[in-house]
């Protein structure tokens, strides 16, 4: 009995110490998995698409083939998945008096060129594709 009482007291002391330590550690954790400020909503891109997509308007079939080849090269073929991710190169045939092609990115970035084969088009698409920070 003489040994049992000190052993039980030591055991109780260890339990109280561990429990107190856990309470101390958890009482100081004010972290959260939720962001402190909500993420900004994605801005609308050209033609009402999610930001990051690039739209190239054209009138000739030759330009469309060039645009489609560029989309395949960049892995930006137009599909619901790439559109929603803001990673699509969207080719759009227009019937207006457009001469050549017009590339649209963001709400206000426009580049007009005489043909889709102009290297500036590929550079424009590479620069703007996937960017969600454009107005």
Image (cartoon, rainbow, N blue to C red):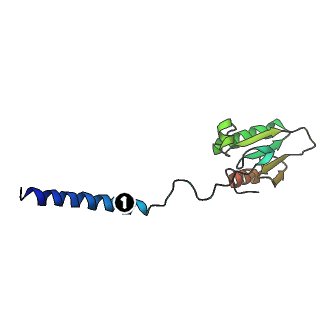
Screen quadrant of the N terminus: bottom left
Asked where in the image residue 69 lies, by quadrant, the reply is top right
Picture residue at 12% right of the left edge, 61% below the top: 6
Picture residue at 72% right of the left edge, 50% below the top: 125
Relative placement, left or right, of 122 versus 12 is right
Q: Position of residue 43 (x, y in %)?
A: 73, 51
Q: Position of residue 20 (x, y in %)?
A: 32, 61
Residue sitting nearer the eye, 131 or 111 = 131
Q: The residue tagged with tag 1: helix, strand or loop?
A: helix
Which residue reaches farthest right?
Answer: 97
Residue sitting nearer the eye, 25 or 106 = 25
Residue 35, above or below 48? below
Residue 27, above or below 48? below
Q: How many marks?
A: 1
Q: Which residue is mark 1?
A: 23
Asked where in the image residue 82 lies, by quadrant, the reply is top right
Q: Position of residue 39 (x, y in %)?
A: 64, 54
Screen quadrant of the C terminus: bottom right
Residue sitting nearer the eye, 33 or 29 = 29
Q: Position of residue 58 (x, y in %)?
A: 83, 41
Picture residue at 82% right of the left edge, 53% below the top: 110
Relative placement, left or right, of 30 versus 7 is right
Asked where in the image residue 95 lies, by quadrant, the reply is top right
Mark 1 crowdedness (10 Å alpha carbons): few <14, some 14-19, many ≥20: few
Picture residue at 32% right of the left edge, 62% below the top: 21
């Amino acid at each position: 009995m003489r040994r049992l009482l000190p052993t039980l007291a030591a055991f109780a002391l260890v339990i109280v110490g561990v429990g107190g330590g856990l309470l101390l550690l958890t009482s100081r954790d004010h972290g959260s998995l939720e962001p402190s400020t909500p993420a900004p909503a994605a801005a609308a891109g050209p033609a009402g698409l999610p930001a990051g997509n690039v739209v190239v308007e054209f009138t000739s079939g030759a330009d469309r083939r060039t645009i489609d080849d560029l989309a395949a090269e960049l892995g930006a073929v137009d599909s619901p998945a790439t559109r929603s991710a803001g990673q699509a190169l969207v080719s759009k045939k227009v019937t207006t008096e457009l001469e050549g092609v017009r590339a649209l990115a963001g709400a206000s970035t426009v580049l007009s060129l005489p043909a889709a084969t102009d290297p500036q088009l590929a550079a424009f698409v590479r620069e703007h594709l996937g960017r969600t920070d454009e107005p």
